[in-house]
Image (cartoon, rainbow, N blue to C red):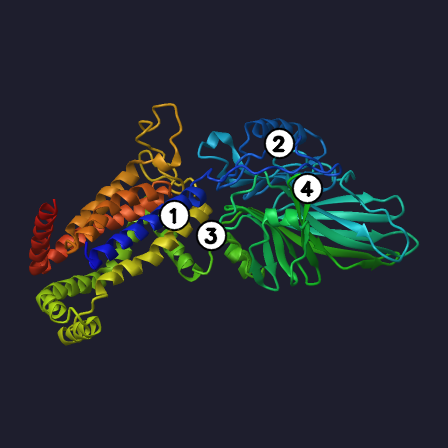
Amino acid sequence: MDNQNTRNMILAGVLTVLILLGWDMAMRYFYPNADAPKPAASAPAETPAANGESAEAAPRTREGGLTNPADIATEARDIKTALASPNRVKIEAPGLSGSLNLVGGMVDDLSTNRHTAALDQAQGLQRIYSPAGTPAQQYAQFGWTAGEGGAPVAVPNAQTLWTAPAGAKLTPQTPVTLSWNNGAGVTFTLTYAIDADYMLTVTQGVSNGGAAPVAVKPVAQINRTDKTAAIDSFNVHAGPFGAFDEVVSFGPDYDELVESPTTAMAGAPNWIGFTDIYWMSTLIPEKPGAASDFRSLGGGIFLANLFYPQATIAPGQQTQRVTRLFAGAKETDVLDRYEDSGIPNFGLAIDWGWFRWFEKPLFALLKWLFEAVGNFGVAIMLLTLIVRAVMFPIAQKQFASMAAMKAIQPKMKALQERYKDDKQKQQQEIMALYKKEGVNPLAGCLPIFLQIPVFFALYKVLILSVEMRHQPFALWIKDLSAPDPAHFLNLFGLLPFEVPAFLGIGVLALLLGITMWLQFKLNPAQMDPVQQQVFAIMPWIMMFIMAPFAAGLLLYWITSNVLTIGQQAYLYSKHPQLKAQAEKDAEDAKRAKGRAK
């Protein structure tokens, strides 16, 4: 075997290793339910454990939510019991529904009206908040701690029963004020207002009707369990996050908080809270001056805190502190609207990453197409058509360059033979030949490189955008953000077993392999047999690699392949010499393969 073939074999081996590594990453990071179970720490005595901690936590999913069957059953039972309490004020708004808990004066029951918990709408709305002590606990609480100086003051706590006006209901038109008097002349109030989306505005008031000044420190807090947390992967963060001095920080993660139970963030908080892939809960101070931190209480319970400066209230005086609470879906338009209203970088709560300058416009175009045609699958196909149309002139240049490269092959071979013992001179003469003939050897790679950002951007859009969640295409494709559910090995769901991720080849994956194979068949054959073999097996390797990805991403790639095949056929008709050369190369490759045997 000569040196060239040796290099080709090494290249093929390296490509195979990279493909296998990429496959493993796909299984671990992109396929739902791919994360391994993690041990759960025991809850401290003062922390309300969610109905007892199991010895081992259930696996997290990409979307988040309870996965342990026992937890799911317990949650349903406990929610029913908690919401049956008379100490609740109903919440009815276009974006959110639920209730305020008069015990503790907290927000612990919220569901988003625009998104269902599962593809099966019978499973109800997507729950954002659940009461303390339930397996899915997550809630927001607003209160005070006693300050320094002034008369001793009793402040409300998590067991305090607040008073609400008779018949109170929180709607965008009717704010609700809860009140509590500490028996010493000091009255505390919590006034809740809600908008049409996912924002509550909470005004913490203190009125001193006593005879001496009192000092208090307002606080606001989000409390959540990590049982419902989404997978925190290398490309999409799920966990504590916020904006500090107008810089968005995706971190720390839950494991880091367990190791360092109190983590203060550098900079003044613009907003702070917890995020999953599609949902988030954040506290937004109305005025500067707050401090913040994240905390782990043990037992998988975590806090995001806002601490306000001390306020001293003289007799007959009162004070207020306003905090906004976002609890809902990370809808792009909604977050951008809140950012436009003054919340710094709120639109970046979606973890677009450094490529957002391209991802957000691509998503805007995709959404516009969806609004025009009413189907996200069709919108993806139209987007692909637009991308291919934009790159068509480049593809024409690519084919012209391929034709020119084929035309100078005899001259190149002559130079290679003439300077076979002087590689440096050989390269110089070949480059001079390129310049003389006006050929760019890299022109053929340009369309591929230009498609990479589009592919990556669409991938991020599919996994990040709640707008794409549960969006159907046609026939069996009911959710474009999830993998193709139709697997050959279980006869498309007819056989009662779960197909392993690495064998989950569906209809879309097979179509991807076939269209890629057809596309490669139309390309000119490689002169080197090893390279030709690598190109021959590449479509089927990619079929396995891409099978676990979102169906919408496969739909984009299949459409792109089909358009490329049509484009190749058209351009071959414009460059008949290239088609003839491709057919000749294919015949030469077959003869070379026959001689090798």
Q: Which mark is residue 298?
A: 4
Q: Is residue 476 left or right of residue 583?
A: right
Distance from label 1 to label 4 (Cα)? 35 Å
Amino acid residing under circle 3? Asn
Identify which residue is drawn at 35% across, 46% down: 20
Q: Secondary structure at mark 3?
A: loop
Which residue shows up at 49% across the image and 41% down it? 63
Between discs 2 and 3, the one toward the N terminus:
2
Q: Does residue 326 appear anywhere in the picture?
A: no
Decide: marks 2, 3 in contact (CB < 8 A)?
A: no
Sequence-earlier tag: 2 or 4: 2
Is there CB contact under 8 Å for labels 1 and 4? no
The reply to whether dot 2 and dot 4 touch (C-beta < 8 Å) is: no
Front label number (2 vs 1): 1
Q: Nearer the viewer, mark 2 or mark 3?
A: 2
In percent of width and height, residue 411 lies at 9, 69
Q: Compute the Cα span from label 1 to label 3.
A: 16 Å
Q: Which mark is residue 55?
A: 2
- The residue to which callout 1 is attached is 21
Mark 2 belongs to which amino acid? Ala
SS label for mark 2: loop
Label number found at residue 525: none
Task: Give yes or no for contact between labels 3 and 4 (Cβ–Cβ under 8 Å).
Answer: no
Where residue 150 appears, as percent x and y from the top left, is: 89, 57
Q: Position of residue 564 (x, y in %)?
A: 21, 52
Closer to the N terminus: mark 1 or mark 3? 1
First in sequence: mark 3 vs mark 4: 3
Label 2 vs label 4, nearer the camera:
2
Could you say which quadrant of the image residue 288 lies in? Answer: bottom right
The residue that label 3 is drawn on is 235
